[in-house]
Image: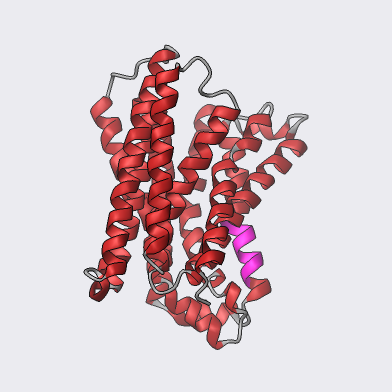
Amino acid sequence: MHNIVGGMCLLILAGIMNASFSLPMKFVRAWAWENTWLVWSVFALLLLPSALALATIPALEGILAGAGGVALTVALCGAAWGVAQVLFGLALDKIGIALTFSIVLGISAAVGSLIPLVGQHRDQLLTRGGLVSLAGIALVLLGVTVSAVAGRMRDRSQHAEARTAHFGVGLLMAIASGICASMMNVGFSFGTPLSAAAASHHANALWWTDAIWVPLLAGGAIPNLLYCAYLLRKQRTSENYKAANSGRNVLLAMAMAVLWFGSSVLYGIATAFLGDLGPVVGWPLFMSLIVIVASVLGVWTGEWRNAGSRALRVQGLAVLILVCAVVVLSRATS
């Protein structure tokens, strides 16, 4: 299934879908964040992965039951990713959007790529592919850091509210979120025995990774659902589900789930197209493309209005660096 061009095209589409999955939330009315996120979690992390896997993987129940420790490891990695989602939201409130995004995506891109490279492909670490991967990861970190600088400049130009209190706690939350977020790709990488089992049951090669998503995202659902339940109780927002707009809001949350899970499925297929180093190269590529697309969407939706030309130029430099990272990482598998 080695197909560099096909893999890159799928990653670009996955990046567009992932970066834009939250757009439907802008149109949700009469619901709090936790109302929408709970519905999103149920569909994106439980129902859609299970439905797709059941439709594409023969004997899925037997594969998961026979996987033993592998399925448990994958689920625990998913749970760590779920914790990252909670920490991400808390860090946003303490240190702001720009810094939180830069730290979380930067650490996730680096750690999520390096652990599979060192753990599964150590013999390729000093080869051309391994060194090019390391160079690409370094460019991703640089690009995300420059993007953070642009974000801080934008926030100051827009007179955003300062978040100096508990800055150290917020910084630690963001770092922990980045490490935990990387576990999504680590679990995906170490879940390859599940893909192999799907192949042995004559599943179509495009859908082998569906067997990984089920335990991975089920593990991720647990912290998200628990946190939403906590907020619903604390904020007393469960009554919002009785609002007149609830049917429309459910459809919007389902659209979010389709975009997000669809991007994950495309990422899984793309890594297979990219060859042995697929998860090593694909993850930082995926993170870079998300930042690039999110930057474009941010300008389009007015998030950079009144930010000043200097902030926009710096963000443009960040996007340029990330584009270079995409080019470099695409050469790691060629």
Horizontal side of 120 relative to 19 (left or right) equals left
Q: Which residue occupies the extreme left position in the image?
A: 126
Q: Position of residue 27 (x, y in %)?
A: 68, 30
Image quadrant in which you'd find residue 269: bottom right
Q: Quadrant of the C terminus?
A: bottom left
Q: Which residue occupies the extreme top position in the image?
A: 159
Image quadrant in which you'd find residue 92: top left
* Placement of 307 over or under 205, stated as above or below: above
Residue 144 seen in this snapshot = yes
Q: Position of residue 312 (x, y in %)?
A: 45, 25
Question: What residue range appears in magenta?
Answer: 45-53
Q: Position of residue 5 (x, y in %)?
A: 54, 65
Horizontal side of 130 relative to 189 (left or right) equals left
Closer to us: 9 or 206: 9
* Placement of 153 over or under 321, stated as above or below: above
Closer to us: 2 or 195: 2
Q: What residue do we see at 39% from left, 36% from top?
A: 318
**Residue 88 is a magenta residue:** no
Q: What residue do we see at 60% from left, 27% from top?
A: 301
Q: Which colour assignment does the render follow?
A: secondary structure
Image quadrant in which you'd find residue 31: top right
Q: Position of residue 222 (x, y in %)?
A: 48, 53
Residue 93 seen in this snapshot = no
Q: What residue do we see at 76% from left, 37% from top?
A: 248
Closer to us: 106 or 190: 106
Main SS of the magenta segment?
A: helix
* Placement of 317 over or under 7, stated as above or below: above
Q: What residue do we see at 37% from left, 75% from top?
A: 69
